[in-house]
Image (spheres, helix red, strand yellow):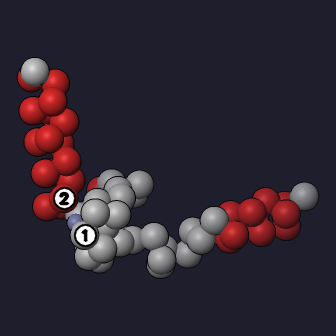
Amino acid sequence: MIESAIAAIRSRGSDGRGRSQCTDCGADIPAERLSLVPNAIRCTVCQEAFEFRAVAKCAH
Ligand SMILES: [Zn+2]
């Protein structure tokens, strides 16, 4: 039972590599940012741009 859970976690690629790149520009997301926001999918620049767009959309 425990082994199958570990296998499921491993198959998700939770070894800290492979999913630490920005989904927008493909740049590596700094480890420092990932430690603050473990599920971050964007680098700081793209996240700010994304939030700015989201805010701009809400304003209208
Ligand atoms: Zn980016």
Q: Residues within 10 Å of mark 1 (few under 14, many from 20)?
A: few
Instruction: Residue 47: give x, y in percent of width and height.
Output: 21, 53
Q: Give the vertical position of 58 relative to 18 (above or below).
A: above
Horizontally, residue 10 falls left or right of residue 51, namely right
Horizontally, residue 27 falls left or right of residue 3, namely left
Instruction: Residue 9: give x, y in percent of width and height.
Output: 68, 63
- Give, as a three-letter code, the residue at label 1: Cys
Horizontally, residue 44 falls left or right of residue 30, namely left
Instruction: Residue 17: give x, y in percent of width and height.
Output: 47, 78
In the rendered image, which quarter contains the N terminus? bottom right
* Residue that badge 2 annotates: 46
Residue at the far top in the pictured view = 60
Q: Which mark is residue 13?
A: none
The residue at 16%/24% (across/down) is: 58
- Give, as a three-letter code, the residue at label 2: Cys
Q: Is residue 55 visible?
A: yes
| Residue closer to the observer: 59 or 51 | 59
* Residue that badge 1 annotates: 25
The residue at 28%/63% (across/down) is: 24
Q: Residues within 10 Å of mark 2 (few under 14, many from 20)?
A: some
Q: Is mark 1 within 8 Å of ligand 1?
A: yes
In the rendered image, which quarter contains the C terminus? top left
Mark toward the start of the polypeptide (1 vs 2) = 1
Q: Is mark 2 within 8 Å of ligand 1?
A: yes
Instruction: Residue 14: give x, y in percent of width and height.
Output: 57, 68
Disc 1, disc 2: CB below 8 Å?
Answer: yes
The residue at 35%/72% (across/down) is: 21
